[in-house]
Amino acid sequence: MPSKRLARFVGLALVVALTHGVGPVWAGQPTAADNHQRMLRLLQIDALRRGADGDPASPHAANYDEARANGLMHTLPDPLRMDDGSAVTDAETWWRARRPEIVAHFEREIYGRAPQPAPTVRWTTRGESSRTLGGVAVDTRSLEGVVDNAAFPGIEVAIALELSVPARTDGAVPVVLEAAVTGASRSSRAAGPSPNSSPPASRPTRATA
């Protein structure tokens, strides 16, 4: 179900605001810099690590050398060894103990955790279409998720999402989710659903599930 997976796509700072009643800071429309600083403050982040530089001559240049990229592979934890060092020797131990440990590591170190209780998201279909994505024919459903803002009515959140699956297939298939934060989602509710909805104008970020 997309609603469970997409709970993680709601910005952590936004969830904090909704669940803990963090009030607005600005009288007018905040700038991108204002939003950025407020998010850092909400997440209690003092500084950000510098990103990779597109200039190959820069000391901070992005690395494309496989040997350097994999230089720390030996430091990665063994997926079949528990945190206490004991080995995973059967499927029951994997599902009951080791897999939850790995999921917890990803939540703590990579994805982050959503504060509880996280607001619910109500999903509606705005349109369906067929297209080619990455050279593969797919069927795409344009969705809109409206976040329950009962905890903080001053904020209205609508998530524009496109869910694509390979065309003309049966059974379990990969799913591609394209999420875009645009102003079109709010106006589309007033205009009503469009069966020929096009992809969002801004370049979406992609996640596979």
Image (cartoon, rainbow, N blue to C red):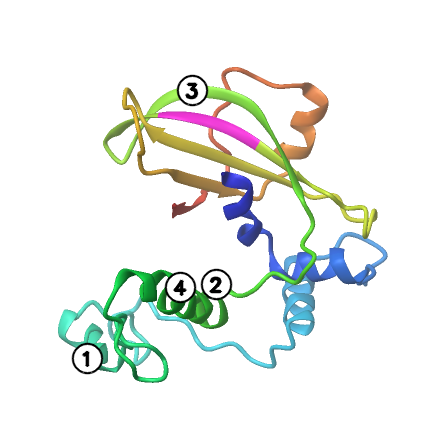
Q: Residues within 10 Å of mark 2 (few under 14, many from 20)?
A: few
Identify the residue position indicated by label 3 in the image: 129
Q: Mark 4 or mark 3, which is nearer to you?
A: 4
Identify the residue position indicated by label 1 in the image: 71
Q: Residue furthest right?
A: 27
Left or right position of 60 against 15: left
Per the picture, the main secondary structure of the magenta-coloured stretch is strand
Say what secondary structure mark 4 lies in.
Answer: helix
Q: Amino acid at mark 4?
A: Arg
Q: Residues within 10 Å of mark 4 (few under 14, many from 20)?
A: few
Q: Mark 2 or mark 1, which is nearer to you?
A: 2
Identify the residue position indicated by label 4 in the image: 96
Say whether disc 3 or disc 1 marks the residue closer to the N-terminus.
1
Q: Residues within 10 Å of mark 3 (few under 14, many from 20)?
A: some
Q: Position of residue 56 (x, y in %)?
A: 24, 71
Report the residue at 13% width, 75% height from top.
67
